[in-house]
Image (cartoon, rainbow, N blue to C red):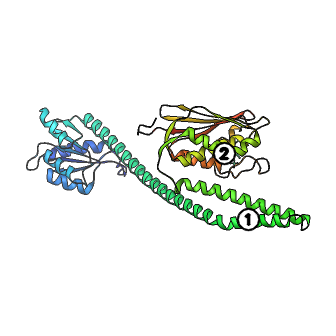
Amino acid sequence: MRPVEPPDSTAKTILIVDDVPANLEVVGRHLENHGYRAVVAQGGIEGIERARLVQPSLILLDVLMPAVDGFETCRRLKANPDTRDIPVIFMTALTDTADKLTGFEVGAVDYVTKPLNGAEVLARIGTHLQLATLRQQLELQNTQLRQEIAARKEVQATLLRSNTELEQLAYVASHDMQEPLRMVASYLQLVAQRYQGKLDPEADEFIAFAVDGAKRMQALINDLLAYSRVGTKARPFAPTDCATLVDLAVADLRIAIEESGARVTRGPLPMVMADGMQMNHLFQNLIANAIKFHGKEPPQVRIEAEATDTGWCFSVRDNGIGIAPEYFERIFVLFQRLHGRREYPGTGIGLALCKKIVERHAGRIWVESTPSAGSVFKFTIPRRGDGTP
Ligand code: ADP
């Protein structure tokens, strides 16, 4: 006698729907012998009800049944959200292709022909259960992905909001600090002029420190203000002549150029669609850095532009101290400087400002450099579909 096996709790349930009890019996036993749990229903109406209650993994459905036939049963199963996703395999004695096609039309995944071949039935059930599992996994992954995307979008929106708020805060704070600071600086300068040499030498030194501190804070606030203005005081893009902008920037840097003995030259530069004021800041910062970070030789600075497939690539080349590759990214971050204030003065805002301006114009900025041999700062400005060259 065969020992009684405990029921397998992981066994998949197959619902068999047929109007002939003998068929139900044979197919049911065959499936149970191969590790499935078989549930039977006699006729379409009972089949639909059982499917809803039992939620089988798959339904074997006879086509030819009185009252509600297999096609109609399948239609109703597919119309109900509770049973819609259960795969249905038709059992058909029909050899007519049209009927097989009708089976697929009403939502079946496959059919087996009567008289049934036991091995074939098992093979088809196995395949479709596997497919159904894969589909469920895919759907689950899809849902998870969708949830992840939604969560990311929310984080992005929050970041954007707090970024805008921070920008406005930085703008208001630096703007409102300008006035009192101007007062501190000018009165300190007045004290310095009036009492220079009249107090003791230590007092002269203290006043000089205070004046220097106030000046540095002014520079910092001005740069911060310029930085926050890229977002808050942006102007619409308009045709902008880069040659004129570079000439203007060079004129503004006249004192630094004369003091350092720099030679600043440029090639032909294009018209671009841009915020002219911001482009002026961009050139001015890059040229000022090219002059400031010079080596033993007087600075040689060259500004050029080259057409690319998508727009223009500008370059500002110098023969200065250069930058080690490990700092190529870091120098574009706010307040990141590679030198002490005494070596080279500065606030560490210039390149962060340049990056922000270039990105507002949908471009990219980077540096190519060899320490002691000079640097080339490059940035792109994409062409816009407005006929601008
Ligand atoms: P700042 O000039 O106020 O220090 P920037 O943001 O303009 O700040 O530059 C960041 C750092 O990048 C500088 O401190 C300097 O170390 C480096 N750097 C920028 N431009 C050049 C250049 N042309 N040559 C060498 N180093 C440079």
Residue at the (68%, 57%) spot, across then down: 220
Distance from mark 2 CB to nearest ligand 1 atom below 8 Å: yes
369 or 287: nearer the eye?
A: 287
348 or 113: nearer the eye?
A: 348
Report the side of 296 relative to 47 (left or right): right
Distance from mark 1 CB to nearest ligand 1 atom below 8 Å: no
314 or 46: nearer the eye?
A: 314
| Residue placed under numbered mark 1 in the picture | 186
Residue at the (53%, 54%) spot, across then down: 231
Report the side of 162 relative to 300 (left or right): left
Q: Amino acid at mark 2?
A: Ile
Q: Amino acid at mark 1?
A: Ser
Task: Give the image quarter of residue 318.
Answer: top right
| Residue placed under numbered mark 2 in the picture | 331
Secondary structure at badge 2 equals: helix
Report the side of 359 relative to 43 (left or right): right
* Mark-to-mark CA distance, 1 and 2: 33 Å
Q: Position of residue 61 (x, y in %)?
A: 19, 44
Residue at the (29%, 45%) spot, across then down: 32
